[in-house]
Amino acid sequence: MPQDDTRIPNTVLIALRERAGLSQQDLADELTNLAATRYGKHPQITRKTIGRWERGEVVWPQPFYRRLLAQLFHCAADELGFRRPRLVRSEDEPTMPMVSPPTFTEASTAAEPHVEHDQDQWRHIRSALDRHRRDLAVLAESWYPDHRIAGLENTGVISSPAWLPAEPVPLDEITLALDPAIDEPLITGEEPESAAVRPLANIDTRFRCYHDAIRDLAAPRLFENRLCFRLAELDWTRPHMRFGLMSFFDAMDINEALAHEFAAHHLAIDDGNEKVVPRASRRRLAFRKLVADPFDLRRRPLMGAIGTLTIRGGECPSVVLHHRDSARVAGGGGMVHLIPAGIFQPSSVIPAAITADFSIWRNIQREYAEELLDHGEFDGSGKPIRYHELEPFTALDNAVRNGHIRVFSLGVVLDALTLAGDILTVAIIAPDTYDAVFTKAVEANAEGSVPARTFPFEENTLTWLRDSKRLSPGAAAALHLAWTHRKLLLN
């Protein structure tokens, strides 16, 4: 293969060998044995061969050698530190005419054992992650001791004092601004620090993004990219929120990658038995360290998910919650969450819809229609919604105007495991209005099951729900904050 006169040492390969505790001769022997046992080949790989690779005398070894190295070190071939040579043609060098049309050969479909193993490990961790999200979130909370919320310790929720108003804010008092020209975030999820949670796609490369791996290896029933509103600024003194635009997959590449990385290092798995280790480690969590301050909205895209605690008011107030099915949703599977809850996003990519749907109340209305009344998903492909003509939107709007529905914002919190954000709201609905609007409420929807009965909104029930250890961080925070301010909310 071509040799490079610059001879830049391959420090990556040296580091891989040294971390494996191998000398150059040991590595040569390991590669020779691997070639013989797996492929029935007997190449001449010696200590001198390894030395030439490491010193940069050979910048691009034969494909078979790169494959052996990738398999031995359980990495992609493009992570071995070799530099692909570029063909430089002399100005005086004649070009040969093409005498026959090009042919295209199909890529080999034969799976590489170490690629399959890497993907299987990824699936195993992702599956275990869904089974232990709540416990992992509680453990991740200890990473952010300065951002715990009094009364919500050990629930997996964190926030900044500036993100929680002193008391619930009526929704109609909050001004929203949409800034499509907002700066791109510094972190996208494609950085080298996230490589450990992006499995091998083939012998040469890893999946480019975490959502690519979800799509190809463990796609849930609901998994599509949608335009979303990205939270960029929050100020409760005005009160004011500023948003930009992002995609759903932008969030997956950060939030779920962070959760996967944490699970990989904090789940002890032995013969099918799984448990969360008792203490959080700050070692080897390269991607979480890269994200750093979870409240710096310039560093990463923060998708604004709106979670609404629905309270049927009256003399005996009650709430309804939602059990999210991990086989149907890409995030938050297996936990009990608020209903309605949904990403802050337009119902369609048509500009008129984006303008009309840039409203927290409109988002809540759509989620009521989808999750409790089974009106079908507004999947972003249709025409703008005629809110002033269709039910249940007209009934909900009338109830708000008449004071039969009152909606407040409780603040913004983060799931400590994923760092996904929840714009928490609470809707207090008069009993007659609730019964009329939701008389045909479903007991299951596309994302999970809805209990047939509501839970009493009283202290013993809230304590029982929290002790069940199944509440999502967002649901735990909404219930706690609403109970704290119950006199103002229930009036």
Image (spheres, helix red, strand yellow):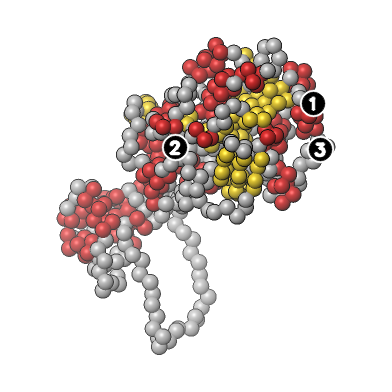
Between 381 and 144, which is closer to the camera in this rendering? 144
The image quarter containing residue 422 is: top right
Identify the element where label 2 is drawn: helix
Q: Which residue is rendered at x = 33% and y = 28% of the image?
A: 279
For the C terminus, the image quarter is top right
Q: Which residue is mark 3?
A: 388
Residue type marked 1: Asn
Circle 1 crowding by C-alpha within 10 Å: few under 14, some 14–19, many from 20: few
Q: Is residue 340 above or below residue 22?
A: above
Amino acid type indicated by mark 3: His
Which is nearer the N-term, disc 2 or disc 1?
A: 2
Q: Which residue is mark 1?
A: 402
Which of discs 2 and 1 lies nearer the camera? The answer is: 1
Residue 265 x/y as whole percent: 35, 36
In percent of the image, x 71 and y 37: which residue is there?
A: 362
Q: Residue furthest right?
A: 389
Question: Where residue 431 sits in the image (x, y, percent)?
Answer: 74, 17
**Marks 3 & 2, CB-CB < 8 Å contact:** no
Position of the N terminus, as image quadrant, is: bottom left
Report which quarter residue 365 is drawn in: top right
Nearest to N terminus: mark 3 or mark 2: 2
C-alpha gap between disc 2 and disc 1: 43 Å
Secondary structure under badge 1? loop
**SS at circle 3:** loop
Q: Are marks 2 and 1 in contact (CB under 8 Å)?
A: no
Name the kind of residue labelled 2 in the image: Ala
Q: Is residue 100 above or below residue 265?
A: below
Task: Tell me the number on the disc at residue 329.
Answer: none
Mark 2 — residue? 259
x, y percent for residue 194: 41, 47
| Residue 317 at least partly seen | yes
